[in-house]
Image (cartoon, rainbow, N blue to C red):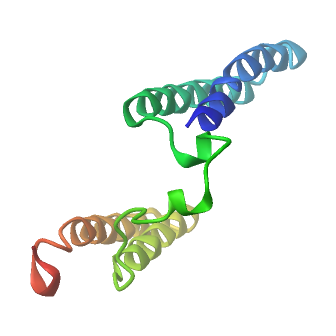
Amino acid sequence: MKIEKNLFLYGVPIFIPVAFIYGWLTEWSEWVGFLGIMLVGGLAGMIGFYLAFTGKRVGARPEDRLDAEIHEGSGEQGHFSPWSWWPLVLGLSAATGFLGIAIGFWILYIGMGLAVIALVGWVFEYSRGYHAH
């Protein structure tokens, strides 16, 4: 994870000075851009720190070594549910929530209710029913 760590951590000393330059160029009259760029720098720092911490704990992956072969990266990459409908329900509830922000707040509450149902369904998908462990 060395490349990923460096990609994010090298962004921090770029974004923070750029935020101050942006603030100076706008004569500090536009705070949203300054704050947004500062938050991007902070987020890049948090992600870079997490990747550095995880990289020390996990060790070198085949992608990090120059002498690695393709077959070394094969095997299980994670746990995925190809038959799950809950991500679709969650996406539709997010779309309903954004529609509610644009049209009327009463629609937002419907989207929030659907999002709670979708999250609970997705989290507990393997705790009950046919695929329970």
Q: Is residue 36 above or below residue 73?
A: above
Residue 124 x %, y %: 17, 68
Quarter residue 32 falls in: top right
Q: Is residue 76 above or below residue 49?
A: below
How many labels were placed on the picture?
Answer: 0
Q: Is residue 84 left or right of residue 43?
A: left
Q: Residue at x 34, y 81 (%)?
A: 84
Outermost residue, right direction?
Answer: 25
Residue 49 x %, y %: 50, 25
Quarter residue 111 falls in: bottom left
Residue 15 x %, y %: 73, 23
- Of 70 and 36, nearer the camera is 70
Q: Residue at x 23, y 64 (%)?
A: 123
Quarter residue 70 falls in: bottom right
Q: Is residue 26 above or below residue 48?
A: above
- Of 74 and 69, nearer the camera is 69
Q: Residue at x 65, y 44 (%)?
A: 67
- Of 116 and 71, nearer the camera is 71
Q: Residue at x 38, y 78 (%)?
A: 89
Q: Is residue 19 left or right of residue 38?
A: right
Q: Is residue 70 left or right of residue 88?
A: right
Q: Quadrant of the C terminus?
A: bottom left
Q: Is residue 100 left or right of residue 87?
A: right
Q: Quadrant of the N terminus?
A: top right
